[in-house]
Every structure is written in structure tokens, then in C-alpha cells.
Image (spheres, grey):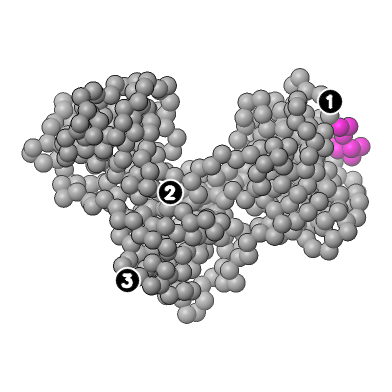
Amino acid sequence: MHVPDVNIQAGGPMNVFASGWTLSSPQKRGPLPVTMTTFSPYRFAASLSFTLVTVVGLCACTSRGSADAGAADAAIRDAGAIDAAPPGLPAPPDVAAPPFDAVRTSSGLASKVLAAGTGTEHPGQNDSVKVNYTGWTTNGKMFDSTVSPLQPGRKPEPANLSLGRVIPGWTEGMQLMVVGEKRRLWIPEELAYKGRPGAPSGMLVFDIELLDITPGPKAPDDVAEPPADAQKTADGLASKVMQKGTGSVHPHPNDAVHVNYSVWQRDGKLLDSSKDKPAWRPVTGVSQGWTEGLQLMVVGEKRTLWLPSALAPSGRPGSTATDVTIVLELLEILQGPKTPADVKGPPRDAIFEADGLATKVLAKGTGTVHPTRSSSVTVQYAGWTTDGKMFDSSYSRGTPASFGVGSVIAGWTEALQLMVEGEKRRMWIPEQLAYKGQPQRPQGMLVFDVELQKIGDSSPQRGVPGGMGAPGGHPPSRPQQP
């Protein structure tokens, strides 16, 4: 499926994601019907993001398994044209435009009931649905179907979707339906893929049969705004303790926390969630409000945070932050690395290179071989700006990072080749060897403590996804070329 955050897999289904919000760690997602669609949105800088399917990254609310496998089989070529595929199901006679008796909403969505349903309840925006569907472009070409799949070898079977993760036209249209109902939707481009390359273009037409509804999580009663008894800070953060904690220590900015969380838009739409499976997240690197709110808490405490947009995660790169409400339960604190005393600049006993890189061995290694530019390495690391703020740490995620030596920023590539396995080294990387002032990246000189755990075989020189401080946390990738 498709939802305005489209992931297209060569020769495979097109995932339609629409929002891009996510705190959650990146996960592989099953195919989804071609029209609907990441809190991390939150892909919090640790991880919050959206998707027919909207979220490609916020909460993975879709069902997996055989239902997903049949959900999206869109062998889509060139914005909806089908290349070397069976003709599919014939288009409806009114595929070019909605008829006079179609029901229109203020958003521009048009729909018509083809068969009345047997249910009485309508799905909500956070619910999941089981559906059969077929989609056409207005020239009558079918581009996706669970009833008559285009992809060779894919069996006809219903799709399970989260309404919070599909294109806006699906989210709105499905909420008009009841179980057993069949309805035709005419979805204008602004509620579909908005001209995204590789996705079906223009108005899209879907025939949908709603088979079942699975209720989703319920938004907090006070999701829209903080109650009168909420605590407020000078910068606009509001919070309220919902359950007192049993601990006495507050998280430090460099620490990691084991938490249950859910992130909500103020209109009650779920953006991201740990889904009752606790997750490790950094205290720093998600957003200012996340960091500030966590430091108010102790282990065992459950608290609701109301973050104004200025303190909230921004979601996908280039997206605009909005006010969000976060429900947090703090289960455990993992002490993070301490900020170096010499974070402002390299000391006299550092090793200085001609290009400005400075390093200092903190612990000698046990190996004798140095990695090359084409090697892969596994490391634990933490990074700070020169004002002492940690912006990323593999220690805080509880797992080391692996990547190609040549796929990271120049300062890392150079310094790693000075190291051996078992060695721990501090690096002072000048801006010209780091991100060169690239927007949304750490600025100025950067300081890293790096522990080289393993040198691997040669690996393809691919850019590392994300980058320092990005959701999910990754080693610092090369700056993008202008």
C-alpha cells in the first residue's frame, strides 16, 4: 500500500506511509496496501516517525505475517502505470470522477456505499482494520489489489492495516465505514501521495470492503491540553505525575532509560508507542522536552508530559514539530558515559595530525592490526559538542554499532585507522572533518570517545543511514554533498 511516506522495494510491494513520526527503533515492515501510509514520529532523535501507510517509522501498528504479505503487491512503475503485469480487475464505470450521488467531505474526499454493512461501530484513527481492496488510477489502470494481486505468486488475501499509518484519504474514508460494508473512495491527490515520485499520481479510486476492526490504544482523557494541576516549567513544558515512583535518583542527560511510552498528537492520534514492550532510549538526543521531562522522574514513576512544538521532536528530516503529549513510565536507569573534562579542546599530550584531527589513547588495545578504509568495525562510542552536551551514544542504546570505516565522517575514518582492537581513544574532530556546518547535524568541533571492539572483513562503502544524533542512533555518516 501507499501512504505518504512511501518505501518502494524494487520488484515488490509499495509501502504507503504517511506521517514519519517515530521514537521507535527502525524495524523492517511488511508490505501494506498501496494507498495508505514516520514519532520516529517519533523517530525521536533516538527513534519517533508516519505512513497507506503513513508512518514509516512511528509505531509499527500493522499486523505481520501472511496478511501483510498479501497486503501490498503494487508492482508499480512510473507513477501508477503497470509494466508487464496482468490486466487486473476492470475499473468501475465511474473511475474517472465521483458520480453526483457520491458523498463529499470538506477535505475533498468523495465516497459511495456499494453494499451496506452489518456492523454498527466505526473504526477510529488509532484502530487497525482487516480489509479487501483494489485501487485504480483515474485512467482505469489497476495498481494494487488484495483481491486480484498483480505480483506473480502472491495469493489473494485480506490486508491488516493501522489507520494511523496510511494516507490521509484512507484514514478519513475508513472511519465512515462499518464492518461488512463495501465502499468506493475517490481520493484527491492531496489526500493520497501528493505527487511523490514512484507512487500513483493524481486522484486515486479504491473499492474497499471492511472485514474487521481491532481497537487501538485510547488517547489520554487530557491529551489535548494539560489540566490545571499540571506542573509547568519556564520554557513551556507541562507534566503531571500519574503514578509515584519508588526510586530516589533522577536520570542524568548522558544516561539511558528503560521506559514504556506513547506519543500522541493533541487531536488524539497515536504517533509512536513502545506497545507495552519496554524500550531503551537515550535521555538526550530525542528533544529538549523529552530530556527535561525525564530528568523530573524517578524509577517506578509514571508521568504525562505536554510538550509545546518548540520542545517536541521534529519527526522526519525537514518536517515541522508540533505540540505532542507523551505518557512515560520510567522502569530503569542505565548510567551513561561522563562528559570528558577536556571536551572544550585537546590537551597538550594529544596526538595532532596535519589536518587538525587530535586524538588521545585512553586505554591500550590488545590487537596488532589496524583497520583500513575498506574494513568494517564494531565500536562503542559517545559524542559531545564542545559545550559538553552529549548528542549520541551507543552506550545509551545498550548495543555497539557496526559500519564501514569509509562510510563515516572524515575525522572518524582517519582516527579509526590509527586504532587496534581493544583500544579506547578520544577524538577531537574539527568541523571541516565532521559535518562542515550541515543543517540538523552537530555543529563545530566534535569530541568522541571510541572503543574499537572488532575489525571485520572489507565491506561495501555505503553511507551509514541516519547519522549522529539521528533517531535510532548511528555512527556519524558522511555529510551530504551539496
The front one of 475 and 324 is: 475
Give how far apart the Cα atoms at labels 3 and 1 are.
66 Å
Relative to residue 365, is residue 58 depicted above or below?
A: below
**Quadrant where the image shows the C terminus:** top left
Q: Residue at x 36, y 54 (%)?
A: 256
Q: Callout 1: 10 Å neighbours few (<14), some, many (20+)?
A: few
Which element type, helix, strand or loop, lies under badge 3?
loop
Magenta stretch: includes residue 103 = no
Q: Residue at x 71, y 57 (%)?
A: 214
- Say left or right for 46 vs 454: right
User: Sequence order check: which comes first, mark 2 or mark 3?
Assistant: 2
Give the amino acid type for the residue marked by disc 3 in the picture: Ser
Magenta stretch: includes residue 93 = yes
Give the amino acid type for the residue marked by disc 2 in the picture: Ala
Give the amino acid type for the residue marked by disc 1 in the picture: Pro
The front one of 68 and 33 is: 68
Relative to residue 122, is residue 161 depicted above or below?
A: above
Choose top left, top right, bottom left or bottom right for residue 250: bottom left
What residue is disc 2 on? Answer: 46
The front one of 443 and 54 is: 54
Evaluate whether residue 8 shows in this view: yes
Per the rendered image, the range of residues in magenta is 89-96
Choose top left, top right, bottom left or bottom right for residue 355: top left
- Say left or right for 62 vs 447: right
Relative to residue 451, is residue 407 depicted above or below?
A: above
What residue is disc 3 on? Answer: 248
Q: Position of residue 353 (x, y in %)?
A: 16, 28
**Quadrant where the image shows the N terminus:** top right
